Image: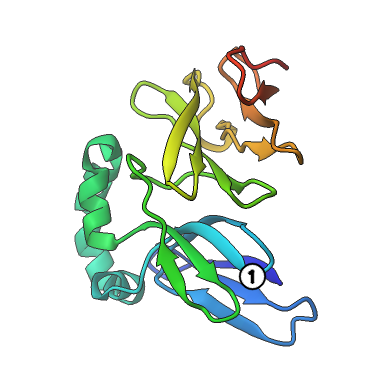
């Protein structure tokens, strides 16, 4: 299968997206997530993927289809997103945003509840499909976090907490974008915490500082 995001700007400037999947010959293209917001995802195995999606609730359908509704919400959402560290739980309770596992053959989905995870991040499933890396965007203190989730008991192990210099914002920002070594003994990630964009290697299971 091939999965991809279909993204577009509405006439009033709102950003919308949906998750599509096709077989390798593109004979059958199916929309898996149409709630107006589909974000980062990764394959768990040949038939399942996990990603941060918005379910098709009534409020989300209104946000996706009504420019008037979006204009009315925009001032409040701007304030809430500016303080997302405080209001993430409230935002999620309304929108239902979160990690979901989707069976691409049947279209069925199951919410993946992970304690303390309240916002979208870049996820990366391990080759075995048992673990998931995810990062966070810089908070008000410019701190980024990287952690690994054991998907069976749904437990989190923090890996690193890094400070991103203020000059790395907007199109110059540096997301951590962690990736697995095939044998799952190490990961690599991008970071600017030492003042320039570098790639770091972190051996898992060892109490050691990440190395270039």
Q: Residue at x 58, y 33 (%)?
A: 176
Q: Quadrant of residue 85?
A: top left
State the quadrant of the C terminus: top right
Q: Position of residue 28 (x, y in %)?
A: 68, 86
Q: Residue at x 56, y 56 (%)?
A: 41
Would you say residue 123 is visible in this rendering? no
Q: Residue at x 34, y 74 (%)?
A: 56
Along the viewing direction, whichever of 43 and 173 lies nearer the viewer: 43
Is residue 12 toward the left or the right of residue 75 in the image?
right
Q: Residue at x 49, y 33 (%)?
A: 147
Q: How is the image coloured?
A: rainbow
Is residue 10 toward the left or the right of residue 178 in the image?
left
Q: Compared to 208, does 168 lie above or below?
A: below
Q: Position of residue 141 (x, y in %)?
A: 36, 21
Residue matched to label 1:
47
Q: Compared to 71, does 196 lie above or below?
A: above
Q: Position of residue 111 (x, y in %)?
A: 39, 62
Q: Compared to 122, does 111 lie above or below?
A: below
Judging from the image, what secondary structure is the residue with disc 1 in?
loop
Q: Position of residue 161 (x, y in %)?
A: 47, 21
Is residue 175 toward the left or the right of residue 27 in the image?
left
Residue pushed farthest front?
153
Along the viewing direction, whichever of 189 and 79 lies nearer the viewer: 189
């Amino acid at each position: 299968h091939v999965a991809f995001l279909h993204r577009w700007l509405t006439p009033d400037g709102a950003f919308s997206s949906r998750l599509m999947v096709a077989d390798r010959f593109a004979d059958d293209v199916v929309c898996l997530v149409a709630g107006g917001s589909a974000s980062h995802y990764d394959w768990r195995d040949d038939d399942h993927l996990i990603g941060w999606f918005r379910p098709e609730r009534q409020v989300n359908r209104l946000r996706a289809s009504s420019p008037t509704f979006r204009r009315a919400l925009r001032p409040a959402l701007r304030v809430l997103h500016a303080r997302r560290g405080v209001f993430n739980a409230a935002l999620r309770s309304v929108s239902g945003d979160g990690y979901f596992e989707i069976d691409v053959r049947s279209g069925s989905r199951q919410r993946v509840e992970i304690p303390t995870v309240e916002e979208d991040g870049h996820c990366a499933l391990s080759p075995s499909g048992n673990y998931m890396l995810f990062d966070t965007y810089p908070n008000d203190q410019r701190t980024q976090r990287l952690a690994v989730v054991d998907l069976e008991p749904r437990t989190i192990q923090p890996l690193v907490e890094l400070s991103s210099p203020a000059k790395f914002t907007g199109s110059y920002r540096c997301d951590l974008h962690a990736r697995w070594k095939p044998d799952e003994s190490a990961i690599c990630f991008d970071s600017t915490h030492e003042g320039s964009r570098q790639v770091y290697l972190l051996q898992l299971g060892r109490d050691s500082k990440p190395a270039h």
